[in-house]
Image (spheres, grey):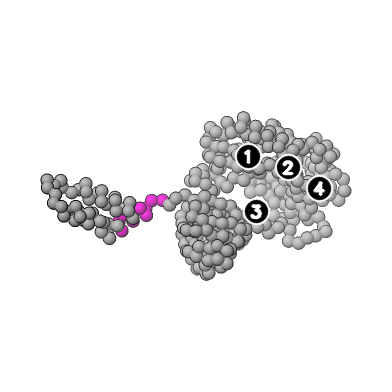
Amino acid sequence: MPRVLTFKVNIETGKQGPNEPVHFSFNGHKMPFEKVIGSNEPDAIFEGSFDVNSFAHSLTLVGPEKGKWEIEKITVDYECEGEKPYAVNWGAITLDETSEVNLWQDPPIPAFDV
Amino acid sequence: MNIIKRFFSGMKQKDEPIKDTVDIAEPVAELTASEPTASETAAASERFADEPPAARTVLHAPVISQGVFSKESDEILIKAQPSPTGDQCMFTVNRMLMKGCSWYFDSFESAVESSLAESIFSLDDVETALVCEATVTVTRKDKTLVDWKPLAKEIGASIRNAMQEGQSLIADKIISSIPSEDVIREGIQKVIDEEVNPGVAGHGGQITLLAVKGNSVTIQMGGGCQGCSAADLTLKQGIHTSFRKGVPEVGAIFDETDHTAGLNPYFS
């Protein structure tokens, strides 16, 4: 469970998007993204980041307050203390006012050729 | 808004003095007076805003794998990935070793006629080997050593040798002994119901069988097991042992528990 210095999301919205402010939840605390570019309206790309500087127990993308949000792809770039920067890609998922989606994945376990 | 108005109406009526006489025009005036002011409404909104939001369900989108090997190759490529706990190491090969099923070798004797396992068990420090699809997961005897590199290189060479020899990597008698998914499911469920769950119930835990694919099973640890620091120990020393004793043909056992999600993970 490393200390997350910063993370950046890139979210591709499909045919249905709420076009409302995007929030994430870090260790149960709901917050808006910083350095936002784009939106989550249909077929748009949203980019946002946050300088966390805290240990990650959970990180989720919160669903819209109203309506459905069809997400085609999510990419998260993480920078964690003592780790090489890494990125994780997730596939399609649909969120609504009752759901959120996990955005946390531990740094990859080092592998070597034998 | 109506609820807020009613709340304030009720409060106001309670505080008002009881009157002996009421004229006809007064009820209308009283109704107007009981309407909340802007500041009262704002205060009520602030009060309700303090309530925690309704819990949401945490979903898991499919992870798009980047692939272990950067390019296709005619050569046998092997990646070694020691576990964070250091007790085992997974070797991923760019070829299929056992398609659609898996097998757990717990001793040198169990490796007879399986050239892949025989080759791996020829190394002194190997305790067990689990072959699953394109991977081999090895545990070592010496638990005090955390540096896998020397042994991993030897295991990599053993896997490569066995594949180049061209003999059956897994014994035919093992392949033919693997029962159907229904038999595996029934047997594992029985072990969960009769042995595992009664055991972990004392700690508020619960194990659920999520899926059976071939002879590999996927479970989820819930209740007090979720997020518990001893979950890995419970899984490896308790659940694995019970499963393999009850259903000897079971292969890989995957844990799909998200130990950080849910409404009541252990760490919270």
In the image, what residue occupies the spot 67% across and 55% down?
A: A110
Provide the secondary structure element on which disc 1 rests. Answer: strand
Can you say whether A29 is above or below B256 in the image? below
Mark 4–mark 2 distance (CA, rounded to whole Å): 26 Å
Q: Which residue is mark 2?
A: B214
Provide the secondary structure element on which disc 2 rests. Answer: loop
Disc ID at residue B209: 1
The amino acid pointed to by label 2 is Gly
In the image, what residue occupies the spot 25% across and 59% down?
A: B37
Instruction: Give yes or no for residue B41 being in the magenta stretch.
Output: no
The amino acid pointed to by label 4 is Ser
Mark 1–mark 4 distance (CA, rounded to whole Å): 34 Å
How many neighbours does mark 3 have within 10 angstroms: few (below 14), some (14-19), or many (20 or more)?
Answer: few
Which circle's residue, 4 or 2, is located before the other in the chain?
4
Report the front residue among B57 and B22: B22
The amino acid pointed to by label 3 is Ile
Q: Is residue B73 left or right of residue B238?
A: right
Disc ID at residue B158: 4
Q: Are marks 3 and 1 on the same chain?
A: no
Q: Are marks 4 and 2 on the same chain?
A: yes
Q: Is residue B214 left or right of residue B235?
A: right
Magenta residues, as a range?
B42-52
Q: Which residue is mark 3?
A: A109
Give percent across and percent down for residue B259.
56, 46
Q: Are marks 3 and 2 in contact (CB under 8 Å)?
A: no
Give percent across and percent down for residue B46.
33, 56
Residue lying farthest to the front in this orientation:
B24
